[in-house]
Image (cartoon, helix red, strand yellow):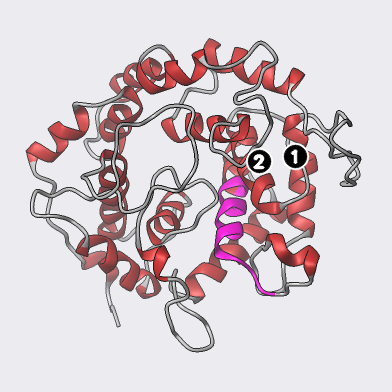
Amino acid sequence: MMTNPSKRQFPKPQESVIQWLLDSDPAIRWQVKQDLLGAPPAEVAAERARVATEGWGARLLGLQAADGSWGGAAFNQELDSTMHVLTLLREMGLDPASDAAQRAVGLVRDRVRWQGWDWDGAWRGLDFVGNPFFAGEVEPCINGQVGASGAYFGQDIQRILGLLLDEQLPDGGWNCEAENGSTRSSFHTTICVLEALLEYEWAVGGNQQVTAARLRGQEYLLERRLLRRLTTGEVIDPAWTRFSFPTWWHYDVLRGLDYLRRAGVSPDERMAEAIELVESKRDGDGRWPLETRHPGTTAIELGEAEGQPSRWTTLRALRVLNWYAAGE
């Protein structure tokens, strides 16, 4: 058992690794400068502004259709829908206040609808023009992802928020299968909802009910040490030890830790095993591989192959280790 998490130290990233991260897209560069290098805010902001005009962010924005959608749908089973693209733009850090973000998100708000879903949660058939995009649909996993992007981009997600608060299970988490009788939470659904609640708190400030629900949800993860059954201590799903990006609706240990970092949670011994897992995956060159690519067609390629060093995974792993070692 770890007695003093703040004393845990990890090797500093090699200069070559930092340069490799910087030799990339603005979406990664600005986060490296902010989270790993502590660059001046003006330098970080200038780099972040390029997300809208260069590289992946600009390419995604350029794919938006006149009807406001990507992939012709609010959501699809592939990975190129409006929901998926907004998730990527949020992960890339497109500035919500930028003109490009305001235009794109305004089109989504005004024109994109959930085909078939009515405001009361009833299914009306594919011919029914349903809820506005940021009102969400019915599954907490999907609503969590939509809510996170909506809150980040300054949209009204009150309907989604109300549903998520009402759907929290007694064990503290959420599960899309609750409507079918499940009483146990799902890590996949819970992490999607937690990210949405956190984005909402950042967007609007403190909210006692939202914060209380989020803290209960993160305790659900922590009580299980981010990967183990509460009853037997067994690893719940070995797939969670393999890191992916984009994660979409899928949970993995690095995603759980990155949420805790962003939420400002103080490191404790319940995270120790998960942190050791992250550190163990650093290769001899100081980089982390992309271990899993979730199946589906994405709107754009991010230039990373399964089994090869990943800038996204390396960035996220390094900032998680830094947060943990600092022992806030």
Crowdedness near tag 2: few (<14), some (14–19) or many (≥20) residues, C-alpha within 10 Å: many
Q: Is residue 324 left or right of residue 131?
A: left
**Residue 136, label in figure:** 1
What amino acid does circle 2 point to?
A: Gly
Q: Which residue is mark 2?
A: 147
The quarter of the rendered structure image containing the C terminus is: bottom left
Between 309 and 172, which is closer to the camera in this rendering?
309
Whole-percent x, y for residue 117 in the image: 84, 39
The CA span between labels 2 and 1 is 8 Å
The residue sitting at 21% across, 66% down in the picture is: 8
Which span of residues is magenta-colored? 184-197
Q: Is residue 248 left or right of residue 69?
A: left
Q: Taken as a whole, is the magenta stretch helix, strand or loop?
A: helix
The residue sitting at 65% across, 52% down in the picture is: 141
Q: Is residue 122 left or right of residue 76?
A: right
**How many marks on residues?**
2
